[in-house]
Image (cartoon, coloured by chain):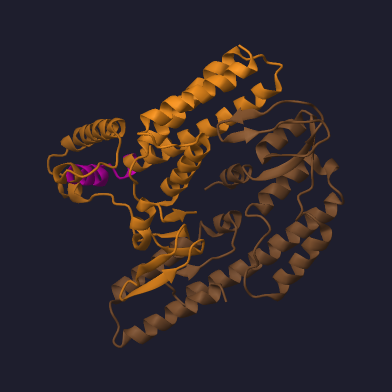
Amino acid sequence: MDPEEVEFLGEKEIITIVPNFNYGIINLISGDIGPFRAGLPVKVPMWVAVNLKQQQTCKIQQPDWMDIDFLEELRETEKNTQTFTKMPNEHYMALTKSILNCASDDLIRANEIRTLVKDIWDIRMSKLRSSVDLLIKETASYAAVDNLTMMEINSVRPLLPHALDQIYRMKKLQGPRIGSNSTAGQSSRMSYSFRS
Amino acid sequence: MNNMDIDHDLNNLLEIEEDEEDEILLSPATLVKIIEEAWLNEKFSPEILPNKQEYVDLLLGQLAAMDDNLENASDRDIKKGVHQLEVDRLKFLVCSYLRTRLEKIETYIEHILKQENERIEKGEEMYLTDAEFNFANNFKEGVDKHFDNLMGIHPTMPISWKNQIVQPNINSFVFAKSKADIESILIDEGNDDETVYVNKDSQIIISYNSVSNLVKNGDVQLI
């Protein structure tokens, strides 16, 4: 899957904008948006927000989670726990990217936000890489990948599934081992270290 | 045509289609969601999945109606831009979904046709739509002819290659998200079997084989 396609899905996330025009309800196929009242916040999908912003007809309101204190705390939590922390938004990376791209003038301390989100992403990616390494060494058959966002999953997709395919093939060739029940159970349980 | 008419027409259109759907109330938003999920499933599953023709047709109907309305709308209307953008996004979605299926048909032509013919014999529901099935048959004819022409000049050529069918690797690993609590998923360990319990909304990486039925009945979404 292309990262652009993940972004495409991310653009469906709902955010709040402040329009500078008046307009009634618009009946989109994917749901109604509006009514728009100049100066009053209204919730729209990200792709509508980008479109309106490009025409200079709205301001994008900073999402609650795009807050320096919150993100700093999130970064510390992410750093100090072994598991993946739940992100404030499934598409936090795509949203940050498009909001910063088209509406950085609407944000408070935009540059710091950019750095913080990038930091969080980097910490998570490095965790992900070590988890993948562990997973493959344990030759696991499945693993929980809770709290990973789509973009993060997509980044290991070119490699991890194929590596596991090969392991599966090798196991198949190897055939059942003697007294394998306990070993197999153990190895699968250990695969949960992805989560623990 | 003014704005009110566009909305009005759209609503009319929906009501008609809801009636055709055996009184099942299907909001357009749900429809979009169904196609989106089908798109992701089709993208990540190694084999071709049962078709979603009825939903695709419904969505295409909506898009066509919207296209018509947009032609008559004024360019200066804010609404037009937004509607146009949405139509383009949804068209991309549908096209990408259908193209993914065609790619699979071309790659696994022999395998898919064999399975479909077995399904016809057993009287089961077919995975391909009529149009896709036609395409598959024509494509196979073309490929066979092409190979026969090429190989014909070497009469001594063994024909055993014809038995080497390209098959999807249904054991390949996929990322999946559960949409319901699942009592047990059978894990094929390659040499041992094991079952796991999966909670609603958890994400796992797992062999496609273990979840293929759950993907088809909608309990599991590939991501």
Hue of chain B? orange
Q: Is residue A160 above or below residue A194?
A: above
Camera-nearest residue between A140 and B28: B28
Q: Residue at x 46, y 79 (%)?
A: A189
Camera-nearest residue between A177 and B35: B35
Q: Residue at x 84, y 42 (%)?
A: A106
Q: Is residue A182 above or below residue A188?
A: below
- Image coordinates of residue B210 in percent, x first then y, are 35, 63
Hue of chain A? brown
Q: Residue at x 37, y 39 (%)?
A: B52
The boundaries of the magenta stretch are B106-118
Residue B116 magenta = yes
Q: Main secondary structure of the magenta part?
A: helix
Drawn side of residue A146 relative to residue B118, left or right: right
- Image coordinates of residue A22 in percent, x first then y, are 78, 26
- Image coordinates of residue B167 in percent, x first then y, are 29, 51
Drawn side of residue A98 relative to residue A195, left or right: right
Residue A127 magenta = no
**Quadrant containing the C terminus of chain A in the rendered view:** bottom right
The answer to whether residue B153 shows anywhere in this view is: no
- Image coordinates of residue B140 in percent, x first then y, are 24, 35
Which residue is outermost to the right? A109
| Residue B213 occupies quadrant | bottom left
Drawn side of residue B80 relative to residue B186, left or right: right
Q: Is residue B142 above or below residue A179?
A: above
Camera-nearest residue between B151 and A142: A142
| Residue A169 occupies quadrant | bottom left
